[in-house]
């Protein structure tokens, strides 16, 4: 069974940093492209970042480029999102998701809440 | 404003058929990129409902179907059930923005 478990969320002050993790199991993690998607309270879904299976190709949404860094450790079956210079508008539940057929997001974690507030 | 446009809400009585539209442009749906649909219940993660415009993952009832034409796509739900009450999102890829895009979401209410 595919499992994705996010962790690392919490309350952080504006300008602060957090590192999110996504632990994968039940599939060959090193073969899968991965994404981070976020959802602000009461709002819709927003794609944040993409990383290829090897980690050699990375993309970011304009809203986070230069502040967030996606990475992965295939030996540890883990995906990461380093978030720096956090802003109030980064407050959201952050989900990791696998990339499936036609670039759909076929498996999702349960999400981790990041709250940026003073 | 979302790149993909969905109605904020739709409703229907049990047993009825409802459709949710997803309107894009020539740089996403109209460019031939696949449309995918997700179902999300309050407080839970989204779940893939339809992929590749019209394909259902294993376990998704055949009451759910998807279609795509031109710059738009639609999700149809037949035989509406109370348990279908949820938020629904469409998703595709946009070549001009070079990123994955979601619709704003549609809240389905079963009357």
Image (cartoon, coloured by chain):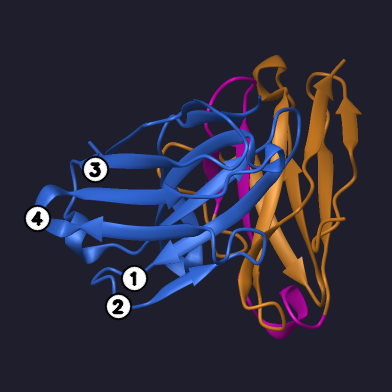
Chain colours: A blue, B orange
- Is residue B38 inside the magenta stretch? yes
Choose the circle earlier in sequence order: 1 or 4: 1
Q: Nearer the viewer, residue B47 or A6?
A: A6
**Residue A75 spot, x, y in % from top left:** 9, 55
Badges 1 and 4: C-beta atoms under 8 Å apart? no
- Give the CA separation, mark 2 to mark 4: 15 Å
Q: What crowding class fits label 3: few (fewer than 14 Cα within 10 Å), some (14-19), or many (20 or more)?
A: many
Position of residue B24 relative to residue B39, above or below, is below
**Residue B69 spot, x, y in % from top left:** 79, 72
What residue would you read off at disc 2?
A: A56
The magenta segment is B26-50
Badges 1 and 2: C-beta atoms under 8 Å apart? yes
- Is residue A10 inside the magenta stretch? no
- Give the CA separation, mark 1 to mark 2: 6 Å
- Give the CA separation, mark 2 to mark 3: 19 Å
Choose the circle earlier in sequence order: 4 or 3: 3
Choose the circle earlier in sequence order: 2 or 4: 2
What residue would you read off at disc 1?
A: A52
- Give the CA separation, mark 3 to mark 1: 15 Å
Q: Chain of mark 3?
A: A
Q: Are marks 2 and 3 on the same chain?
A: yes
Q: Is residue B33 left or right of residue A57?
A: right
Judged by depth in the image, the label closer to the viewer, 1 or 2, is 2
């Amino acid at each position: 069974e595919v499992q994705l478990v996010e962790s690392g969320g919490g309350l952080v002050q504006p300008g602060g940093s957090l590192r999110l993790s996504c632990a994968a199991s039940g599939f060959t993690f090193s073969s899968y492209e991965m994404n981070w998607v976020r959802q602000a309270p009461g709002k819709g879904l927003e794609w944040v970042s993409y990383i290829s299976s090897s980690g050699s190709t990375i993309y970011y949404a304009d809203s986070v480029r230069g502040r967030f860094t996606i990475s992965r450790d295939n030996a540890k079956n883990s995906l990461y999102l380093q978030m720096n210079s956090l802003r109030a508008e980064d407050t959201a539940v952050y989900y990791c998701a696998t990339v499936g057929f036609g670039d759909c997001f076929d498996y999702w974690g349960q999400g981790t809440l990041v709250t940026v507030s003073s | 404003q979302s790149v993909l446009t969905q109605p904020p809400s739709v409703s229907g009585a049990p047993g009825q058929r409802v459709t949710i539209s997803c309107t894009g442009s020539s740089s996403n749906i109209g460019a031939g990129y696949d449309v995918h649909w997700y179902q999300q219940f309050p407080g839970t993660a989204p779940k893939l409902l339809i992929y590749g415009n019209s394909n259902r993952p294993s376990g998704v009832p055949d009451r759910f179907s998807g279609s795509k034409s031109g710059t738009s796509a639609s999700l149809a739900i037949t035989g509406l059930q109370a348990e279908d009450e949820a938020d629904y999102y469409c998703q595709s890829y946009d070549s001009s923005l070079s990123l994955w895009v979601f619709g704003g979401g549609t809240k389905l209410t079963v009357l």
